[in-house]
Image (cartoon, rainbow, N blue to C red):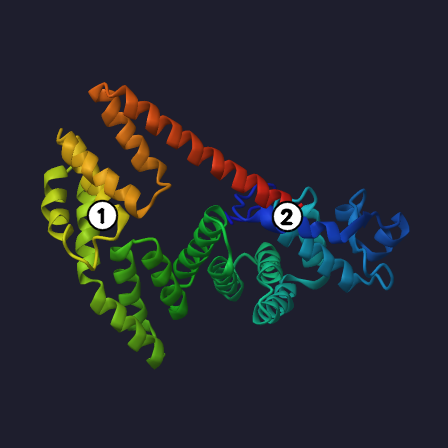
Amino acid sequence: MGDMMENKEIQDRIGEYLIPHVEEFVFDELSDSYLEKAGIADVLTGVPVPIRTTSMANLSTLVIAQNMAFIIGCDVNFKYRDNYIAYIIRTFTKEFAKPLINEGVEAAAKNDFDYACICFRGALLIDPDSADALYCYGRACKDSYEVGEGEEYVGRYKAESLEAFEKLTIKNPDFDMGYYFLGYGYLNLGLYVKAKLTWETFMKLSDHKEQKEEVQGWLDKLAEPVKIEEGYNHVLSGRYEDGLNILQGYENDERFNTWWPLWYYLGAAYKALEDPAEAERCFKQVLKLSPSNVEAMEELLAIYETQGDQEKVEKFSRKIEIVKYNAEMDKAERMNGLS
């Protein structure tokens, strides 16, 4: 989630997967007399409160607050989010976030990662400075993408997890396990330089012997990937010959020549240096390793358009159209499954 500020819409990558849980609730307004008696008329007048369809009776102050936290955890941009937060903090203070975190931890232990994420998101809205909520949220998003399916689902939860750990290390620079998981986040994205620097910080901060041995093993393995990423960065910065000088050395290295980004950046460098034959060879290798890679297809399409090869232009135009259509259908099917 993005920064949680009052009256501000929050960027929400994963809300569409959690919002369907709101259907467990109905909404009704509390009586004016109750609101006046409880001293909350200024925040809840005209504001419907959530009631679980499975628990309509015994609607206590605590239950109302728990339900509100659940709703805003599902939908961080819920219409009455700020009213709910104001009610919870006035009635229970920001300490209300702590039992939510505990509840989320229990849900995660049962592999109910949706519920865990909802609890941690609610806790962060109530107490944005909670390091425990941020850490647990990053963990829950990580658990979600490790068992989840679909490229978009996995990608969104990965991004959300990474952002949570990045925020944690910025806000709490001594929180060692934040660096531990952030390092893995960078590693999974192929950001080897960032993984190396992050883990080096973890090694300085942590007393966890087992995790330190594990991380040291990764640091020992990162020397070559860090060099390859340096090659990528040269290409991205327009230093194409410098990039090629590094990346060409790994074309026949069986440890790394199954990495499609290696071939993609080689292709980009060759294309920029006006060597279309080599660029074509590399982008085709990308497609052998990543058959639905639209970016590589679009690069090949551009090469064939320049060459005036109409047959291949039509072939790759159709391929791109099919891959994009299938991606849209997969998304629609997933959304139907959630509804």
Q: Is residue 15 above or below residue 142?
A: above
Between 99 and 229, the residue placed more toward the observer is 229
Between 279 and 49, the residue placed more toward the observer is 279
Measured in 3D between alpha carbons, the distance from the residue under mark 2 to the one under mark 1, in whole angstroms, is 37 Å
Between 112 and 335, the residue placed more toward the observer is 335
Looking at the image, do the residues carrying marks 2 and 1 touch, with CB atoms under 8 Å apart? no
- The total of numbered circles placed on residues is 2
Q: Secondary structure at mark 2?
A: helix
Image x and y of residue 251, in percent: 15, 50
Q: Secondary structure at mark 1?
A: helix
Q: Amino acid at mark 1?
A: Leu
Q: Seen from this angle, which residue lies furthest front? A: 311
Image x and y of residue 64, in percent: 77, 58
On residue 338, the disc is 2
Other residues around mark 2 within 10 Å, as few (<14) / some (14–19) / many (≥20): few
Give the quadrant of residue 215: bottom left
Q: Residue at x 32, y 59 (%)?
A: 187
Q: Residue at x 29, y 53 (%)?
A: 191
Image x and y of residue 291, in percent: 34, 43
Relative horizontal placement of residue 18, taking residue 183 as reference (left or right): right
| Residue 237 shows up from this direction | no
Q: Amino acid at mark 2?
A: Leu
Image x and y of residue 279, in percent: 18, 35
Q: Quadrant of the C terminus?
A: top right
Other residues around mark 1 within 10 Å, as few (<14) / some (14–19) / many (≥20): many
| Residue 336 shows up from this direction | yes
Q: Earlier in the sequence, mark 2 or mark 1?
A: 1
Q: Is residue 36 above or below residue 173?
A: above
Q: Is residue 45 above or below residue 211?
A: above
The residue beneath circle 1 is 262
Relative horizontal placement of residue 71, taking residue 271 as reference (left or right): right
Q: Residue at x 26, y 62 (%)?
A: 196
